[in-house]
Image (cartoon, rainbow, N blue to C red):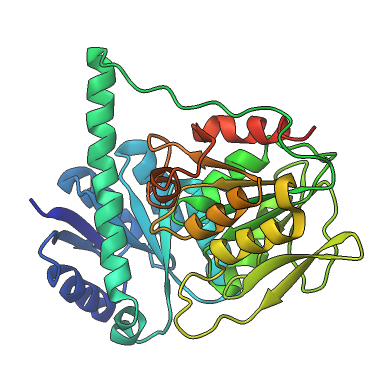
Amino acid sequence: MAFGVLIVDDSVFFRRALRELILADDRLTVVGEAANGREAILKACQLKPDIITMDVEMPIMDGISAVREIMNRCPTPIMMLSSLTQAGAVATLEALDAGAIDFYPKSSSDAKEALGEGARLLTTRLRLLAARKQRQAIVAESAARGSATVAPRHAEQGVIGRRGLVVIGSSTGGPAALQTVLQEIPANFPVPIVIAQHMPASFTGPFASRLNSSMALNVVEAKDGAPLVAGTAYIVPGGKHGEVHLRSGTLVFSEREPAAGENFRPSVNFLFQSAAQAAGSDVLAVVLTGMGDDGTEGARAIRAASGHVWAQDQASSVIYGMPAAVAKAGLTEAVLPLKEVGAAILRSVR
């Protein structure tokens, strides 16, 4: 059975292009369209789609307001479609705070051009997010019947020293997950944290600023050549690769341009591999929600250097791809619900 999609966009041309793209995938179908936020709320509650694609700027009611109302009246997975601008990034992050589950950047004002290059990725993400809604319903039904669940493996305390660091990798669902994790970390956390979140270049600066304004921990977009200091979380700049190097006894952040074919940007693998070389056994790597397997080879390098790898559990992951790949490879020492990750990181330093 195909997953039903509700398309929300004020451009008739964009709706048409998106409809054609969705209908080209036999596992998706379009159950309706809306030209503004008010229409979107009505159709979301009437048609009960499996997932909604939502534009940000629309007449009558904008996408952010519509997200809030839909999540209040008839909660549904929502993917924001936003422009690759700083203003688009800020609006998208507001929509994620309002309850949207994911975002997909429009690379152009031309509908076919904006959707063409990453069309396959977009429809894959729509399917996975729609499937998550059904999986959650099954889990809720099983819980109501009292079905047994497998308890996650717990994290050990004091696994890294004060000269080490924490590295985190995330993708789909990561912005909200990172906020949940980092808000548990105090300003005096004794080691630096470096984060590779798959994001476009224009998004990571506003994302870091938004996190920084909402928690005690200092959160910044990482700068090339900057020393990594305790009590700070560094977001790797979008569209780049971020690495950690040991220079004269100090951990330093370094960025580089991706090569052709390196599609995960920033790469969790590259961050983890460099951390393993720089800090050896004093590295804790945490793999959060995300599609694909980025982070698995990096986790392998960390374990080979006697470092430590934890992963988010399936039940709390938006997309159980990256954590699943690391767990399947036998590289995880602990598998944790999202709500426990921050507190576990706090206890991880000796």
Q: Nearer the viewer, residue 237 or 192?
A: 192
Question: As displayed, is residue 92 above or below residue 142?
Answer: below
Q: Is residue 167 left or right of residue 299?
A: right
State the residue at coordinates (74%, 30%): 158
From where the camera sits, is residue 198 visible?
Answer: yes
Where is residue 140 shown, x and y percent of the image?
A: 28, 25
Question: As displayed, is residue 11 above or below residue 289?
Answer: below
Total marks drawn?
0
Where is residue 136 shown, x and y percent of the image?
A: 29, 34
Q: Quadrant of residue 277?
A: bottom right
Q: Is residue 337 left or right of residue 318?
A: right
Where is residue 34 shown, x and y percent of the image?
A: 24, 62
User: Quadrant location of the C terminus?
Assistant: top right
Name of the residue lying farthest toward the top: 146
Name of the residue lying farthest toward the left: 1
From where the camera sits, is residue 62 visible?
Answer: no
State the residue at coordinates (49%, 32%): 337
Question: As displayed, is residue 263 above or below residue 98?
Answer: below
Question: As displayed, is residue 202 above or below residue 181?
Answer: below
Q: Quadrant of residue 255?
A: bottom right
State the residue at coordinates (32%, 37%): 73
Name of the residue lying farthest toward the right: 248
Q: Nearer the viewer, residue 124 or 269?
A: 269
